[in-house]
Structures are given as structure tokens and as C-alpha cells.
Image: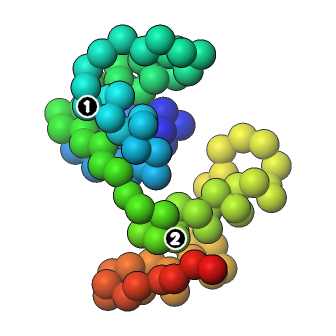
Amino acid sequence: MSTGLRPCKALALTRVVAEMGSLMVVHFIHENREPDNLAATILLDIKALMLEFEDCRLQHILLEGNAAADFLASLGHSSSPGLCSWGSSPNGLRPILTGDQLGVCFFRY
């Protein structure tokens, strides 16, 4: 999450809607309480980054609705370490984005 917010900040975006598959993290961010686990530093960093935007919303998304993020995560996993960027959509992503735009349901097995 923080890795995704940093480029948004660098691009001077003021309004961001982030979707995340972890309902636990979404609840933590919305409940505004202090973390009591090993991920405390990461969670507090996310909260601090979100406050730097005029409007930054975090929403939970079901696994089925996260096909594009899942595709990019798999692509990133097979790439060299560090931030990956492309000049255009990587092969295979465009059909997923088109389906998302059209409201097509993707089923996973």
C-alpha cells in the first residue's frame, strides 16, 4: 500500500482511491487505533501517507475484483527487485482492464 501511495504523491495527485484485499488492514486504517503487532511500523506509515493527500480513501475489494492487481503482482514477482514501470500496458493486462471497465465478471478456480 505504501509502495503504491508514494508514486501517487510524487505525481502530485491530490485524490486517491486505493483498493486492498486485506480486510484486516482496511479495518485498522479506518478504526484509527494504535497497532499492537509486528506490522505496526508499516501500518502507521500507510496512515501517515494517506494524510498527505487532500482525499485518500481505502476500500476493501474481493479477490475476484482484484484481477488487474493480481496480474501485476505476478508480473512483479517474476521481475527483478525494485519498482517496475512500463510505457504502456504489459501484455495480458489490457483484456483484464477492458473487462473491468465493461463490468465483466472474472471467475477464479
Identify the secondary structure beneath mark 1.
helix
Q: Position of residue 81 (x, y in %)?
A: 78, 42
On screen, residue 43 above or below 24: above
Q: Secondary structure at mark 2?
A: helix
Three-letter amino acid code at the position of disc 1 = His
User: In the picture shown, does residue 19 fall above or below 43?
Assistant: below
Q: Quick check: 65 above or below 44?
A: below
State the residue in front, 87 or 37.
37
- Which residue type does callout 2 highlight? Ala
Q: Is residue 39 left or right of residue 56?
A: right
Location of mark 1 (residue): 30
State if disc 2 and disc 1 touch (CB < 8 Å): no
Residue 67: give its label. 2
Residue in the picture at 38% in, 58% down? 61
Q: How many residues crowd around disc 2 within 10 Å: few (fewer than 14), some, or many (20 or more)?
A: some
Instruction: Tell me residue 96's x, y (percent).
Output: 50, 80
Place of residue 66 in the rendered image (x, y in percent of width and height, measured from the top left) = 47, 65
Q: Residue at x 70, y 55 (%)?
A: 76
Count the marks: how many? 2
- Of label 1 and label 2, which has the lower sequence position? 1
Q: Residue 86, located in which quarter of the rendered image?
A: bottom right
- Who's the residue at 38% across and 79% down the image? 100
Q: Is residue 87 visible?
A: no
Distance from the alpha carbon under mark 1 to that under mark 2: 24 Å
| Location of residue 74 by image quarter | bottom right
